[in-house]
Each structure stands twice: as C-alpha cells, then as structure tokens.
Amino acid sequence: MSYSSNPLLPKARVWAIKSVLRDGLPVSVAARRAGIHRATLWRWCKRWLELGCAGTTKSLPTLSSRPKQPARLVSRAVVERIVYWRRYKSRCAVIVHAHCLREGTHVSLSTVRRVLRREGLIVDKRYHKQYRAPVPRPAADAPGKLVQTDTVHLWHGHHKPRTYLYTAVDVYSRWAYVEHHSHISQELSVQFLKRAQAYAGFHFACVQADNGPEFGRHFETALVAKDITVRHSRVRKPNDNAFIERFNRTIQEECVTKYDPEYQPIHHKVLSYLAYYNDERLHLGIQCRTPLEMLQRC
C-alpha cells in the first residue's frame, strides 16, 4: 500500500499483526480482513518480531519517508565554505552566495539558504515590519546626484558622555563617509560635507537631510552658495532617508558596537571600517558589488 500519515494507522497495524501471531490466522486471510496486501502484512510482522515488541504494545509507528541519501547531496567542502563565509561576514544568504561564486565555489542560492537553515545559522524574524508605500525621491543615476546625510547619537553607559557620528552616503554607488565628533552644529555639518566631497572625488549635486537642528537655515544657505541643492525629508517619514538610515544601522552593528579586543578609539575604528566598506564590502542594493566598483563604472 502507498505511504500514509494517518495517525490511526499504527494501531491498525497491531490489530492485523496480532491476528496472525496471536490468533493464528493465515497471512492471506488477515490481510484480506485488514484490506491490505499479504506482503505488506508480512513485512509488518517481520518488523514486529525484529523490534521485540511486547504484548502490551498498542502501536507500530510509521517509518520516516525521508530518503536515506538525498538525490543531490552537497559535498562537505561546499558546506564548509558556506558556513565559513556566513560566520566570517555575518551577512545574509545572498551575500554568502556572492562570496562563494567569487572564490570559485559554484553553488546555487537555494542551496546556500538550505545549508544555512540546516546548520542553524538563520535567525527567524521575531516580527514583520509594516508595509509602507514607496516615497518619490530624486533620480540617482550618477554619483553625487543624491547624497543623504544624518547624525548618529552615541551614548556611553558607564562614563555617560554623548558623542556623535556624522554620516553621508551616495545613493547611486552606496559610497559612504563618516566622522566622529563630540558635538553637532550647522557649521560643523557644512565642514563635514565639504570634507566628504573632497574625500569622494565627485561633486554633490543634491544633499538630503532630516529636520534636525544641525541641518537648519545656515546649513542650507552655505550649501546653496556652493552650488549644492538641499532637500529635507518629510516629518515622520523615515523612508525618505532610507539609505542613510540603513547605513547608520550597519556602521553601529559592524563597527561601533562590535567587540574590539584592542580597544581602539572610535575615530580610529571608523577610519579603518570606511576603507573596508567602500572597497571590499558587498552590497545587496547594487547587485553584490562594492561602492568602488560602482564608481569605476562611471
């Protein structure tokens, strides 16, 4: 008979088996009464005797239908490379798949996801974010067409000094620039973007910021004098600054709050992380490329 997951079937097997072993009925007669083939009942009786089931046993459990050998078994070497890139980069399956392809390990994205799930390296989401309709934004079809900037407030739990990270990201190439300061002001915001533009090597045509006090009227006037258009995000619409907000989370998780055995100052950690972020780190939004590769295309 075909494989069945009926929860009552284990008890029905015992009734048919006991009809043969205890009541002495022929296998063909007991199989006909049970509505199964005699070969099936013979296999049940054989397994019953091999397991040494006692007379008080009330069920014969159904065997798993899982194949003993998968049809397309992934080699252990490939599994080790997938696990290595997941633990080394702490990134999602798409980035792990891209690193595997770059080093010559040919494997599909679905296989990478299956291996990560089997190895327990995928964390289930505890909640689902609410869907929000897309917000129109200026076209970013070249470096510098749209640059988003913001500040991150850092607070030390022991000494309790508040410091700040000035951040900027180019929407087209995902190129980023960061500075660490002890205070914020409009003049400091202007000087930060001036140094960011010099570091980037391309002109900022439009800068988008939120409505914080460090991006006030003086900030806008100073940038307009430098032939830079200033845009402010809508109030209570964080998706307007989605790219810079995502970068703020990335730099906090991968740089600022990450354990550092050498206890380097934050500004030293930020400088070393910038080189990695712009030259080596793969980004999902630009088809698993680096910001440096995007700038070289122009």
Image (tube, helix red, strand yellow):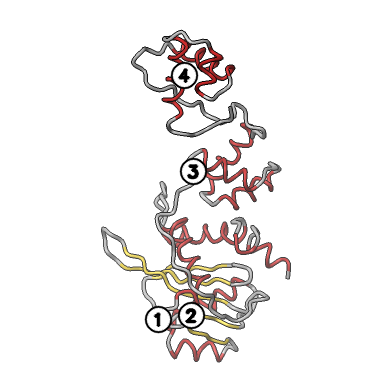
Quadrant of the rendering where the N terminus is positioned: top right
Q: Are marks 3 and 2 in contact (CB under 8 Å)?
A: no
Measuring from the top left, give residue 231's x and y in whole percent.
Answer: 52, 85
Q: CA distance from mark 3 to mark 1?
A: 39 Å
- Find disc 2 in the rendering and name its residue: 209
* Secondary structure state at the residue bearing disc 4: helix
Q: Which mark is residue 52?
A: none
Residue at 63% in and 71% down: 172
- Is residue 28 or residue 238 the one in the foreground? 28
For the residue labelled by badge 1, is the local secondary structure a helix, a strand or a loop? Answer: loop
> Which mark lies nearer to you, 3 or 2?
3
Cα separation between marks 4 and 2: 76 Å
All told, the count of numbered labels is 4
The amino acid on which the numbered mark 2 sits, given as a three-letter code, is Ala
| 240 left or right of 281 in image | left
CB of mark 2 within 8 Å of CB of mark 1? Answer: yes
Q: Is residue 248 left or right of residue 32?
A: left
Query: Can you say whether 149 is above or below 92 in the image?
Result: below
Spatial CA distance of label 1 from label 4 is 78 Å
**Residue at the spot 46% in from the left edge and 59% down from the top edge:** 268
Q: CA distance from mark 3 to mark 2?
A: 37 Å
Between the residue at mark 3 and the residue at mark 4, the CA separation in whole angstroms equals 45 Å
**Amino acid type of the residue tagged 4 in the rendering:** Ala
* Residue 16: image tag: 4
The residue that disc 3 covers is: 121
**Sequence order check: which comes first, mark 3 or mark 1?**
3
